[in-house]
Image: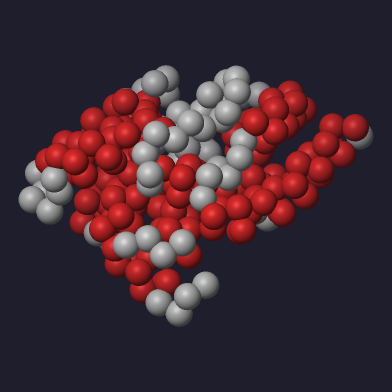
Amino acid sequence: MTEDLPIKVEAAANDSVIVEILARLKDGLDASLCYHCPAHTEDVVQQTLTLATLDSLDTHSMLLLAIAAAFHDAGFLATRSGHERISANMAATAMSADPRFSQADIDLVGAMIMDTEVYQTGAVHRPKTNLSPWLLDADLANFGRDDFFEQFYLVAKENKITPENMVLPTLDLMDRHTWQSPAGRACFDQKKRANRQALTEALSQ
């Protein structure tokens, strides 16, 4: 981790566009969203910026990534189904009011948000932009972290599924998932394999 990483992460994470949407999420999200909650969005923003800094992305790219991360689940304010399009539209509205951002920036952020859709067959993610890999790895970073089982239980609770019935779908998702960025692979791949093995062992008990 580079010495200036915390400074770069803090600068982007505290941008006014991001602060405003995080405040809206804290005030407006349904409390039953125990996984897709404000804490998840805050975590994805921080994780995205950390991964991007480790891979030496430029400052403007990091800001666009942070905005995409902050808005990627904002559509949950309106719906749980097909929220990505609403999220992208919300980001576009916020960015359009800010002279710092070009139409190309707005389109890129929208495309990144759409890339967070999780596919039910084949590859979990199918990134279409050059910046999506860092956002996608951050969004599912819990696969390769110590809080994997904590997040697993939150997903089960939010979807009203018993943990026992969550095991096979989660194993399927993990098997179809791949890390998209160099930093994602370096930071999370080994722990993801260990988490998968632990989940497999839990299934056999």
Q: Where does the image place residue 59, in percent across and percent down from the top left?
A: 29, 63
Res. 54 in view: yes
Q: Where does the image place residue 161, in percent across and percent down from the top left?
A: 66, 24
Colour scheme shown: secondary structure
Q: Residue at (90%, 32%) from the top-left corner?
A: 204
Picture quadrant where residue 6 is located: bottom left
Q: Where does the image place residue 74, in percent across and percent down from the top left?
A: 34, 36
Q: Nearer the viewer, residue 118 or 79?
A: 118
Of the 4 image quadrants, the one containing the C terminus is top right
Q: Nearer the viewer, residue 48 or 22?
A: 48
Instruction: Please indicate whether residue 32 sits to the left or right of residue 69 in the image.
Output: right
Residue pushed farthest bottom? 3
Instruction: Please indicate whether residue 70 sits to the left or right of residue 154 in the image.
Output: left
Q: Nearer the viewer, residue 79 or 106?
A: 106
Picture quadrant where residue 81 is located: top left
Q: Residue at (62%, 36%) from the top-left corner?
A: 177
Q: Residue at (39%, 21%) from the top-left corner?
A: 82
Instruction: Please indicate whether residue 20 sits to the left or right of residue 121 in the image.
Output: left
Res. 27 in view: no
The number of numbered discs placed on residues in the rendered structure image is 0
Q: Residue at (32%, 62%) from the top-left corner?
A: 58
Instruction: Please indicate whether residue 108 sits to the left or right of residue 95 in the image.
Output: right
Q: Where does the image place residue 124, in percent across and percent down from the top left?
A: 56, 30
